[in-house]
Amino acid sequence: MKILLVEDEPKVAAFLHQGLTEQHHSVDLAADGLLGLRLAQQTAYDLLILDTLLPGLSGLEVCRQVRAHDSSVPILMLTALGETDDKIRGLDAGADDYLVKPFAFQELLARIRALTRRRHDAPSADLVLRLADLSLDPVGKVVQRAGQAIQLTAREFALLDYLLRNQNRVVSRVDILEHVWETSFDTGSNVIDVYINFLRKKLDKDFTPKLIHTLVGMGYVMKEE
């Protein structure tokens, strides 16, 4: 893969650059947010890895500006800030996943695999998924509701894809973690609720009927009321 790594700590940047290169990835490195944003806008990357605290322009702002023009590239945030509010700010900015420093390099690789795997599998990916006036094209990465294009992040797209493939069936939080995140995760985290809320704001808030439903103590289901 072609990866953009935006990290201002020289030792961390060198360690990650070497490790990712040894995994046969092509890695461009930027030490500040302004350069990182410029590279992200000029080059088609398969993955962006952004530190949160960067000189020139914060990782969150880089993420927001990238998302304004590219809704599909996976973005992984690296942060020393482990509080839930900090993580939610990253997700709100458009990040698909986050990793709190310090972390094991193998965990970083697992997160990268989880973020990119869905681009290369899904045996029935040639079929457009539909529910009511909502449609999802897995190949073209296009989502529409009532004929209106809906911009989703890579993680939001993966979650919607999974829910639509299981429409009219209740899926638990564990189901979602196993099939959408595809990596170990704190089951006590509210990250799934955050992403479900993101989808509701984009898909249900201004449309009828509502399609995403919560069954307390059981999970979620996509269906027409």
Image: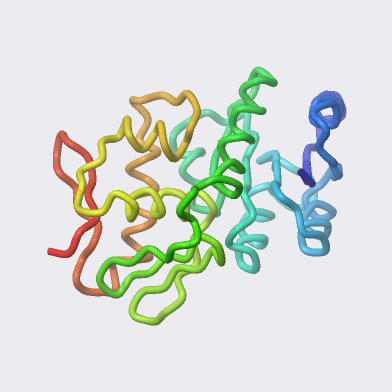
Tell me where residue 74 appears, x and y as whole percent.
Answer: 62, 49
Left or right of 166, for residue 159: right
Residue at the image position 82 percent from the left and 64 percent from the top: 42
Residue farthest to the bottom, as pictured:
147
Q: Is residue 144 shown left or right of residue 175?
A: right
The residue sitting at 66% across, 20% down in the picture is: 106
Q: Residue at x 33, y 55 (%)?
A: 164
The picture places residue 155, in percent across and down from the top left corner, at: 50, 48
Residue 101 in the image, given as x and y percentages of width and height? 64, 24
Q: Position of residue 43 (x, y in %)?
A: 81, 60
- Can you tell which quarter of the image residue 19 is in? top right
Q: Residue at x 59, y 27 (%)?
A: 100
Q: Quadrant of the C terminus?
A: bottom left
Residue 154 falls left or right of residue 197: right
Of residue 30 and residue 134, the one placed in the foreground of this image is 134
Up-down: is 61 above or below 218? below
Of residue 11 and residue 19, the one placed in the foreground of this image is: 19
Residue 201: image quadrant is bottom left
Colour pattern: rainbow
In depth, the one of 31 and 170 nearer the eye is: 170
Image position of 84 with respect to 105: above or below: below
